[in-house]
Amino acid sequence: MMEGTLVVRRMLALTVLVILATSARSAPAYAAPAGGEAPVRLVIPALAVDADVAGVSLNEDLTMPAPPSAALVAWYTYSATAGTDGNVVLAGHRDWQGQRGIFHALDRVAEGELLWLQDATSVWYLYAVVWSASYPEESAPIEALVGATSRPSMTLITCSGAFDRSIGRYLERRVVRAELVPTI
């Protein structure tokens, strides 16, 4: 069995344990988690995604650079760290240089699906998807998508919509927002 498949199966088993534990009791009030470390790994069980995460800085013109490969997830270092208050902003390719990108099926992630984010100290944080939407690239509400949030959140971004060959890019951005699941 491939290591990635084994990790996804372990995450699914942990997800079931968390769901069983939280359904047996009423959900606790949110308390800010310790967190504070850079994210290093993202697991999306519903898509069989198990990917490394690498920090990237904004470009000089304050735009968000694309991840440097099809299989890597970019974490924008201006954003929150794993498990903390704020918005952890991650991006991945839909496709890249003829390869299927890590977020090629991000449009299939549904509300309620669970995502796992591991930090640099090997601590895992569980997030639940609260919405998914596609926005025209030129009119996307950038601050609302990648800015601060009132709850600990994670935002995943990739390309979507039609590909315009004349400009060499997709015309929309798929955005998935998830919120940290409180632990017991």
Image: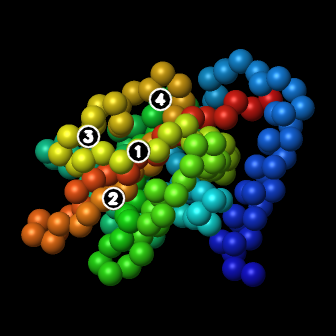
Disc 1 secondary structure class: strand
Residue 120 makes an appearance in the image: no
* Measured Cα–Cα span from mark 2 to mark 3: 12 Å
Which residue is found at the position 51% from the left and 45% from the top? Answer: 38
| In the rendered image, the vertical position of residue 53 relative to residue 88, given as above or below | below
Residue beneath disc 3: 140
Give amino acid for label 4.
Answer: Gly
Estimate the x, y position of residue 8 in percent, counting from the top left. 69, 64
Q: How many residues crowd around disc 3 within 10 Å: few (fewer than 14), some, or many (20 or more)?
A: some
Q: Are marks 4 and 1 in contact (CB under 8 Å)?
A: no
Give amino acid for label 2.
Answer: Ser
Mark linked to residue 163: none
Q: How many residues crowd around disc 4 within 10 Å: few (fewer than 14), some, or many (20 or more)?
A: many
Residue beneath disc 1: 133
Which residue is found at the position 82% from the left and 33% from the top? Answer: 22
Which label sits in the foreground, 4 or 3?
3
Residue beneath disc 2: 160
Residue beneath disc 4: 86
Give amino acid for label 1.
Answer: Ala
Q: Earlier in the sequence, mark 2 or mark 4?
A: 4
Q: Earlier in the sequence, mark 2 or mark 3?
A: 3
